[in-house]
Image: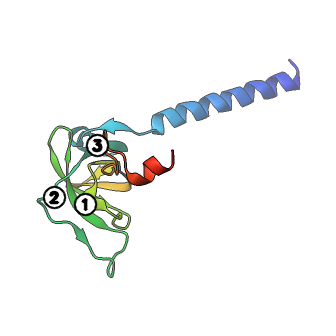
């Protein structure tokens, strides 16, 4: 066998190994129950902010820690610790996606995605939008 064939086989084996590793390390969507059943794995948890519970953010002491309570899509409430600053317009969000993992009695997120209310409603056209056409 030629050296180029051997090198090509080694490169293909490395690529296959990298793909398998990437598939195993990728996170998936879940609810809080599944996240707490598998605390070693990372999950995307979709839910809504519980506006009835307190939110804690003290940028003087720790600007990278924001705590709040969220209800997942199965209505399970869970304490969330976001390891980032409090997002702007957080209270206005309609839906939240957290990326992180369960640790102890809280879900620790390192990333957050928010769906905020739309500026436009169906059937409504603003004066600015109608003058641009």
| Numbered disc in front, either 2 or 3 | 2
On screen, residue 73 versus residue 19, left or right, reads left
Q: For mark 2, what is the residue?
A: 51
Q: Nearer the viewer, residue 130 or 70?
A: 130
For label 2, the SS is loop
Query: Where is 70 relative to 83, above or below?
Result: above
Q: Position of residue 38 (x, y in %)?
A: 29, 40
Give the residue displayed 44% in from the left and 47% down from the top: 130
* Neighbourhood count class around disc 2 (C-alpha, 10 Å): few under 14, some 14–19, many 20 upward: few
**Which label is found at residue 91?**
1
Q: Nearer the viewer, residue 129 or 65?
A: 129
Q: CA distance from mark 1 to mark 3?
A: 16 Å
Q: CA distance from mark 1 to mark 2?
A: 8 Å
Q: For mark 3, what is the residue?
A: 46
Q: Nearer the viewer, residue 101 or 54?
A: 54
Name the residue at the top extreme: 1
């Amino acid at each position: 066998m030629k050296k180029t064939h051997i090198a090509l086989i080694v490169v293909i084996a490395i690529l296959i190994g990298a793909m398998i590793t990437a598939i195993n390390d990728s996170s998936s969507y879940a609810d809080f129950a599944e996240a707490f059943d598998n605390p070693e794995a990372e999950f995307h948890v979709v839910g809504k902010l519980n506006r009835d519970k307190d939110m804690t953010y003290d940028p003087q002491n720790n600007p990278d820690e924001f705590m709040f309570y969220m209800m997942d899509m199965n209505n399970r409430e869970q304490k969330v610790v976001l390891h980032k600053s409090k997002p702007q317009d957080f209270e206005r969000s309609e839906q939240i996606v957290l990326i992180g993992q369960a640790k102890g009695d809280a879900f620790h997120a390192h990333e957050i995605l928010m769906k905020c209310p739309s500026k436009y409603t169906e059937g409504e056209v603003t004066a600015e939008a109608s003058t641009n056409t």
